[in-house]
Image (cartoon, rainbow, N blue to C red):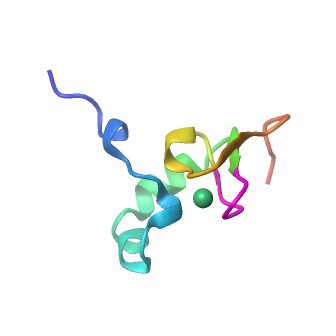
Amino acid sequence: MSKPEKQKIKSFCKWSPKQIQKNFELLTELLEDPRFVCKKCARASNNKKTLCKPEKLPTVAKW
Ligand SMILES: [Zn+2]
């Protein structure tokens, strides 16, 4: 059984501009209802595996 794509995302804190372009759809998915913020890079995500220093947000952020 193959796992969904989300399993193999690497921390997008480290994405290069090229990777951001290439994975833009995935990025926007991860930015929906962000639950975590990276304390190092100030990026937000709903998947803490995509952040290098994830910190839980106290409430779901509304943009
Ligand atoms: Zn980070």
The residue lying toward the viewer, choosing from 18 and 24, is 18
Q: Find out whether residue 43 is within the magenta segment.
A: yes
Most extreme residue toward the right, as rendered?
58
Q: Position of residue 61 (x, y in %)?
A: 80, 44
Q: Position of residue 43 (x, y in %)?
A: 66, 59
Residue at (85% x, 35% y) in the render? 58
Most extreme residue toward the top, as rendered?
1
Depicted 59 relative to depicted 19: above or below: above
Instruction: Using the rendered image of the protein, determine whether residue 47 is visible from the camera's viewpoint.
Output: no
Quarter of the image where one finds residue 39: bottom right
**Dominant SS type (magenta):** loop
The range drawn in magenta is 38-44
Most extreme residue toward the bottom, as rendered?
17
The residue lying toward the viewer, choosing from 25 and 9, is 9
Total marks placed: 0
Instruction: Using the rendered image of the protein, determine whether residue 24 is visible from the camera's viewpoint.
Output: yes
Q: Position of residue 7 (x, y in %)?
A: 34, 36
Residue at (43% x, 67% y) in the render? 15
Depicted 18 relative to depicted 62: above or below: below
Depicted 19 relative to depicted 60: above or below: below
Q: Is residue 2 left or right of residue 32?
A: left
The residue lying toward the viewer, choosing from 9 and 53, is 53
- Ligand 1 sits in quadrant: bottom right
Q: Find out whether residue 9 is within the magenta segment.
A: no
Quarter of the image where the N terminus is located: top left
Q: Is residue 16 left or right of residue 61?
A: left
Q: Is residue 2 left or right of residue 6?
A: left
Q: Position of residue 62 (x, y in %)?
A: 81, 47
Quarter of the image where the C terminus is located: bottom right
